[in-house]
Image (cartoon, helix red, strand yellow):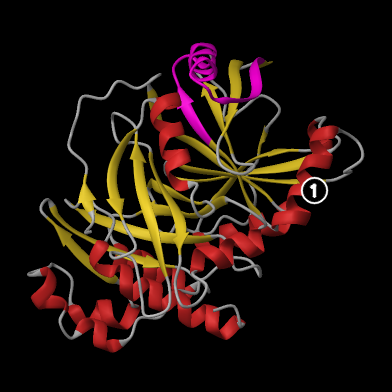
Amino acid sequence: MAATLEPVTPVKDTYPINGTDYNEFYVGNAKQAAQYYMSAFGFQLLGYRGPETGTRDRASYLLQQQKIRIVLTTAITPKASPLAAEIADHVFRHGDGVKDLALWVDDARYAYEEAVKRGAKAIRAPEVLKDDDGEVVVAAIGTYGETVHSLIERRKYKGMFLPGFRAMTPHYAPPEAGLLYVDHCVGNVELGKMDVWVDYYASVMGFRNLLTFDDEDINTEYSSLMSKVMANGNDRIKFPINEPSVGKKRSQIDEYLDFYGGPGVQHMALATNDIVKTVTELRSRGVEFLSTPTSYYDQLQARVGTIDEPLDVLQDLGILVDRDPDGYLLQIFTKTVQDRPTVFFEIIQRKGAKSFGKGNFRALFEAIEREQEKRGNL
């Protein structure tokens, strides 16, 4: 069976989603993590919430680059509140990881009620947060593992981010790296659970199955996986969901599940409009990427046709290329960004292509396996 582009059918979202609002990580040391994402990826530190702003049990740092917002949160006194205890326990069991894929909606109350009515895991009933800049309505539903989707309604708010955050203008503000917005976020789930969550997104949120890849599409000599891409009506939200497949050795999904301690967000794909410039900049700042054998580039031109970028430059940087009926895309994947082999990032540039780089799956998978082997986890 080959990868299939699912038939386009009329889609009616359960509730409209304007886009990604923010992605929140629970981390062991938010202050140091913020410095890493600033220096390595070019994020700007815009806001802070912690003891100095009246929040005694935890600290959060708001980082932004163009339309990408990342919140890094750590527990300060884990026994001070149930939430602080949850944050500390999450980091203990999973390491630094994504807790919240927050969605920007027009009406958080309606979105929450409709989602729960359709079978969503209720996490946080709608709550109004206020300050001098207005009010934000926040609710949350659950998804795979301990990951949640906060539903954020901002129409009556003129502030920087959320009530409780204080604006920051640090002396250290490195230049941005050309990252523009979140293209997609990928989740890893256990064997046999992919279709469960595909059905969940379809029934609870009205998402459609945009693409399907089976273990013949994504495989090497040793391992394989299966994946389905779920998307909302306007395609601003795309959630590929991976599960492992039986192979000769343990796949990257198995390794993730082992070290993360269950299902969760594997990687976030961040878009750029000049991947050569962005990757060059990121490498100069110390970001490490998966390596690509020179043999990959021997037949690249024959496989993808004419492209704008010099082949020797792509080869030097290790950037992968794939084409679909709508155009082509360029992509590259970082190594994991913490010591546990779990979360990493993808840098992607789309030149018309709407797919996810099927032609690169084998090269990517083999690159990940080389790293697994170094760690003794293949």
Q: Name the quarter where the C terminus is drawn.
A: bottom right
- Does residue 79 appear left or right of residue 297 in this picture? right
Q: Residue at x 60, y 60 (%)?
A: 257
131 over 247 or under it: above or below: above
Q: Which residue is drawn at 59% across and 17% down?
A: 137
Q: In which quarter of the image is residue 306?
A: bottom left
Q: Name the quarter where the N terminus is drawn.
A: bottom left
Amino acid bearing label 1: Asp
Q: Can residue 29 be seen in this view?
A: no
Query: Residue 43: x, y in percent?
Result: 52, 53
Q: What element carries label 1?
A: helix
Q: Residue at x 17, y 38 (%)?
A: 7
Q: Name the residue under label 1.
A: 89
- Does residue 288 appear left or right of residue 13 in this picture? right
Q: In which quarter of the image is residue 259?
A: bottom right
Query: Residue 78: x, y in percent?
Result: 87, 43
Query: Residue 108: x, y in percent?
Result: 52, 17
Magenta segment: does it hold 107? yes
Magenta segment: does it hold 323? no
Q: In which quarter of the image is residue 232?
A: top left
Who is closer to the viewer here, 192 or 308? 192
Which residue, as the protein is rendered here, is positioned at the far right?
Answer: 79
Number of marks present in the image shown: 1
Q: Is residue 47 visible?
A: yes
Q: Residue at x 38, y 60 (%)?
A: 347
Query: Residue 115: x, y in percent?
Result: 50, 20
> Magenta segment, which residues?
102-128
